[in-house]
Amino acid sequence: MQSFNHFLREKGVPSDIRSLLYHIARSVKYINFSIRAGNTGKQGAENSFGEAQVAMDVLADNIIADELKKSELAKVIVSEEKEAPEYFPAPRGDFFVAYDPLDGSSLVDVNCSIGSIFGIWEKSADILDRKVDKHFVASCYAVYGPRITLVIAIKDKGVHEFELNDVGEFILVKEGLKLKDKAQYFAPGNLRSCQENEAFKNWVDDCILSGKTLRYSGGMVPDLNHILLKGNGVFAYPSHSKYPNGKLRLLFECAPFAFAFREAGGEAKTEKGASILDITINDYHQTSSIFIGSEEAVDNAVKFMN
Ligand code: AHM
Ligand code: MG
């Protein structure tokens, strides 16, 4: 039984990154508690005491922002729920943290798995106009499912899965997650794109004809967690007339997973074939198409798309 802090220390992860991850893990515990407490009301509604109820994703956003502020390590934060970045006095560090507080929040009321996603960069100044990969040091995501897990990827130190135990500690369950080159599973998001994009339809047909197994929940976190934990698979979310540049957000969704998947030996590309980690960040809320998973399967999908 190894706690995540102890494990990361043994791996030689610098103390500032460990401390930041400790605060992120704390926020995940509070969000988990709120979900279990049934705080699923819509913003603007009233709870049974007549108090204004806060939407779960806004609540999660506030919980994370509070913890990041307390860390004294995050100088700039931005989230899917915030128009603009927030700046904190951070006497102990200079990190930029981008996060999606509750991805797939439309799945909360039907009790499907959801998650939180975090990307951590060093040197918080000049995030815009920088390539995604530059100063990217760690990413992680939490899965709020039947079990609460935290998957952490650290640059050059691998990807590891931790599980929340009954006394509120994240304990190592799987060390050094790796992705095989070939995929048995496929998770095609935005399937409606088949109607107008023959290349995408041909790729989906190819997945079916080659006998791949569909595993798709509608939540990026559980879908990509499935691929990473099974050790193979490919997830797609292509562009569409409704989303000409894809729907998924670069900083909060695509980049943290691209970082973790590369660390596990996988790949993440746009439908045009550019590496997600090579994209230049122009806007905090920019979106991208994405094909991510086992390397050979991603390259094959990109071939179909072009
Ligand atoms: P959200 O951030 O508004 O929750 O949207 C992101 C989610 C992903 O988890 C999922 O892969 C995708 O949207 C599903 O999109 P669609 O509703 O188009 O099927
Ligand atoms: Mg999201």
Image (tube, helix red, strand yellow):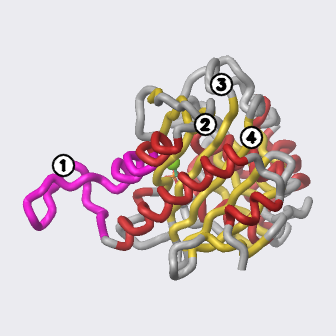
Which disc, if any, is residue 137?
4
Q: Amino acid at mark 1?
A: Gly
Residue placed at 44% from the left, 67% from the top? Answer: 32
Q: Please identify the residue farthest to the front as the structure is shown.
A: 91
The answer to whether the residues at label 3 and label 2 have Cβ atoms under 8 Å apart is: yes
Nearer to us of marks 4 and 3 is: 4
Residue picked out by circle 2:
251
Locate residue 283, reporting x and y percent: 56, 23
Residue picked out by circle 3:
281
191 in the magenta segment? no
Q: Amino acid at mark 4?
A: Val
Which range of residues does the magenta coloring cover?
38-64
Indicate the secondary structure of the residue bearing disc 1. loop
Q: Ligand 2 closer than 8 Å to the CB at disc 3?
A: no
Residue placed at 42% from the left, 73% from the top? Answer: 111
Residue picked out by circle 1:
44
- Which tag, 2 or 1, sits closer to the chain's start? 1
Viewport quadrant of the C terminus: top right
> Is 155 rendered above or below residue 149?
above
Distance CA(mark 4)–CA(mark 2)? 14 Å
